[in-house]
Image: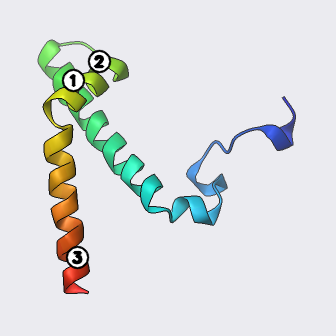
């Protein structure tokens, strides 16, 4: 693959508009929660459960509540501004 055609590998290589996008920030926050869930569930299982299993488990058990909480926090921050 040509060097110019490759995707940015790190946060520093991403264009500024991507780093500042609300959608990207939400993606990063959700990914962080999934990784926390993966760690907790892996500790309980005594082995690495893998990202895919953690993702699916988190979506089923926690995503809707997490999103609700994020929306409330966002509304509160906007109201305070």
Rendered image quadrant of residue 39? top left
Screen quadrant of the C terminus: bottom left
Choose mark 3 or mark 2, whichever is in front: 3
Q: How many marks?
A: 3
Q: Position of residue 51 (x, y in %)?
A: 35, 23
Q: CA distance from mark 3 to mark 1?
A: 29 Å
For residue 57, which numbered disc appears in the image?
Answer: 1
Q: Position of residue 67 (x, y in %)?
A: 22, 49
At label 1, counting other C-alpha atoms closer than 10 Å, the crowd grade (few under 14, some 14-19, many 20 or more) is some
Q: CA distance from mark 1 to mark 2?
A: 6 Å
Farthest residue to the right: give it: 2
Whether the residues at callouts 1 and 2 have beta carbons within 8 Å, the answer is: yes
Q: Which residue is mark 2?
A: 53
What's the residue at 66%, 53% (across, down)? 13
Residue position marked by numbered label 3 in the rendering:
77
Vertical relation: 2 (above or below) 21:
above
**Is residue 77 placed above or below 69 in the rendered structure?**
below
Query: Which secondary structure, mark 3?
Result: helix
- If you read the primary sequence from the N terminus, does the residue marked by circle 3 or circle 1 appear first? 1
Could you say whether the residue bearing mark 2 is in a helix, strand or loop?
Answer: helix
């Amino acid at each position: 693959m040509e060097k110019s055609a490759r995707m940015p590998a790190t946060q520093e290589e991403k264009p500024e508009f991507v780093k500042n996008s609300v959608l990207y920030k939400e993606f990063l926050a959700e990914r962080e929660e999934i990784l926390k869930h993966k760690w907790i569930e892996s500790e309980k299982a005594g082995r690495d459960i893998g990202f895919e299993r953690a993702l699916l488990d988190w979506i089923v058990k926690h995503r809707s509540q997490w999103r609700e909480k994020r929306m409330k926090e966002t509304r509160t921050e906007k109201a305070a501004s």
